Image (tube, rainbow, N blue to C red):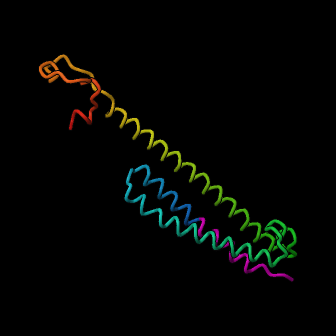
Amino acid sequence: MTTYEPLKAILHEMILVYEKLLELGKEKQATIIKGDPEALLSIFPKESALLKEIRQLEEKRQEETLSYQSLSLSQIIDGSSSIAEKDELLFYQSTLKEKLKGLVDQHQLNQELIENSLVYINSMLALYTQPQESSNTYTASKHFPRENNQSRSFFDAKV
């Protein structure tokens, strides 16, 4: 009878790391919404470390499945003779799928938030960099004519 304990241990570790990554994604979301770039920069190394850990676990999982004649997890589950072991492997498989879907959804939401923030920043910059209209009150151009005074932006006018 083949025991799948090493594979189950790896799958369990993968689930824990995916949960940490999902929590970090939610923290990243809150940071993006808050608009705190320093906190956002502090999240990136943590995220990189977790991704590295996932890569290592995935390599271990692949090595472990190679010892089962290169069967996929679904094939291992189907070939399992113990109902309890089959149920446990199905639980790990479904939990991993659920965590991965959550990560994909969280990543997509964070990406949309970042894109919206960039659109907002660009629109605010456009407001400040477009040419100012001349007023009916005293301006320097009436007494000191300059070339193309109309094209001065808010930033140029302030400098």
| Residue, far left | 143
| Residue at x 14%, y 24% (from the top left corner) | 140
Is 154 or 73 nearer to us in this picture? 154
| Residue at x 39%, y 59% (from the top left corner) | 39
| Residue, far top | 136
Q: Is residue 90 above or below residue 36?
A: below
Quarter of the image that includes the C terminus: top left
Dominant secondary structure, magenta: helix
Quarter of the image that includes the N terminus: bottom right
Horizontal side, residue 143 vs residue 56: left or right: left
Check if residue 7 falls in the magenta segment. Answer: yes
Is 147 or 65 nearer to us in this picture? 147
Where is residue 8 shown, x and y percent of the image? 72, 75
Check if residue 43 falls in the magenta segment. Answer: no
Where is residue 117 shown, x and y percent of the image? 44, 44
Where is residue 32 shown, x and y percent of the image? 44, 51
| Residue at x 75%, y 77% (from the top left corner) | 64
Q: Quadrant of residue 18?
A: bottom right
| Residue at x 68%, y 70% (from the top left corner) | 58
Residue range of the region highlighted in magenta in the rendering: 1-18
Where is residue 104 shown, x and y percent of the image? 62, 54
Horizontal side, residue 156 vs residue 2: left or right: left
Horizontal side, residue 21 vs residue 4: left or right: left
Count all numbered tags in the image, as a single digit.
Answer: 0
